Structure formats: structure tokens, C-alpha cells
Image (cartoon, rainbow, N blue to C red):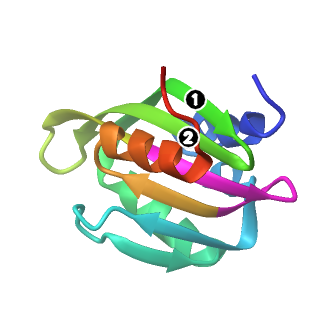
Amino acid sequence: MDELADPVLASYRALNERDIEGALAPLDEHAVWQESAELPGGGELRGKDAIKAFLREFLDTWSDFRQEIEETRVAGNRVLVLLHMRAVGRTSGIATETRYAHSWTMQGGRGVLVEAYRDQESAVRAFEDASGAATP
């Protein structure tokens, strides 16, 4: 796909396999993860250790978890990933699905900022505003 996007996409493949270390591989040691405030536990996480704990807790809530990458966009040092998640609650057994997005800011080949968006349209607008790349 793209030199900038490849490690980011590999991160999602790793998370689908519950490989948290693999999912964290493209992140800088001091990366910041801004989870959507609309979600429980939303807020800002600083550093790989905090992000690792968040991902572990997140994955533990699901007996089955899969993210499908629907679209990827690259502009400058930013990578936007539109995702479709399907999961089954570990305790409830209830199946759920949702679409969301992550916008990665890369520096020196490492993710320094990941911004999570509850809805894809907001993510696309923010990405285009930041990159000056409007959709035709």
C-alpha cells in the first residue's frame, strides 16, 4: 500500500490475532492515544504502557473480536483508517458491530498520535481539514 501506512495496517492485523505487542509495534514509546470521549473509558492515554493496558482491557471484554479495514487514506505524515468491528461480548454473549476510525500521525516512521473517532464521517472531515485534502 504505502510505506507510511504499512506498519499501521499491520497493527490492526496483529490486534485481530490478539497480539498486543504486534499492535503496539508501530507506536513511539511516548505515543499519545486519544480515545473518543463518546466511549466508556474515553480520554487520553500517554505512552505505550498505558496504551497496552487499554488494549488488553478492551480485548478482554470480547470473546470474539475482528476489525476489518474498510479504507485507508494517507496525506503527508498522517494515516486515516476506517474500520468495521464485529465482536461478541465475553460475559453477555451478545454480538455487536460498529464502524469507527483512527487517525495516526507519524514521525520518523513511528506513530506519535492516534486519534479515535466514534463515527467515520467526523474522522474524514478532521483528516481532510488537517491535511487540506478534500474528497472529490
Report x, y in % for residue 3: 84, 34
Q: Main secondary structure of the magenta part?
A: strand
Report x, y in % for residue 126: 44, 50
Q: Which mark is residue 72?
A: 1
Instruction: Tell me: 94 left or right of 104.
Output: left
For the residue pair 129 and 19, the one nearer the viewer reads as 129
Report x, y in % for residue 122: 33, 46
User: Mark 2 touching mark 1, by CB under 8 A?
Assistant: yes
Q: Which mark is residue 80?
A: 2
Disc 2 marks a residue whose amino acid type is Leu
For the residue pair 6 and 76, the one nearer the viewer reads as 76
Element on which disc 1 rests: strand
Disc 1 marks a residue whose amino acid type is Thr
Please give the range of residues in magenta.
101-112
Q: Quadrant of residue 116?
A: bottom left
Residue placed at 19% from the left, 34% from the top?
Answer: 96
Instruction: Tell me: 63 left or right of 9.
Output: left
Against 136, residue 25 (above or below) is below
Q: Is residue 103 covered in magenta?
A: yes
Tell me the crowding category of disc 2: few under 14, some 14 to 19, or many 20 or more residues within 10 angstroms, Cα based. many
Dot 2 or dot 1, earlier in sequence: 1
| CA–CA distance in space, label 2 to label 1 | 6 Å
Residue placed at 87% from the left, 59% from the top?
Answer: 108
Counting every numbered tag in the picture gives 2
For the residue pair 30 and 86, the one nearer the viewer reads as 30
Tell me the crowding category of disc 1: few under 14, some 14 to 19, or many 20 or more residues within 10 angstroms, Cα based. some
Q: Quadrant of residue 46?
A: bottom right
Residue placed at 74% from the left, 45% from the top?
Answer: 76
Q: Is residue 59 covered in magenta?
A: no
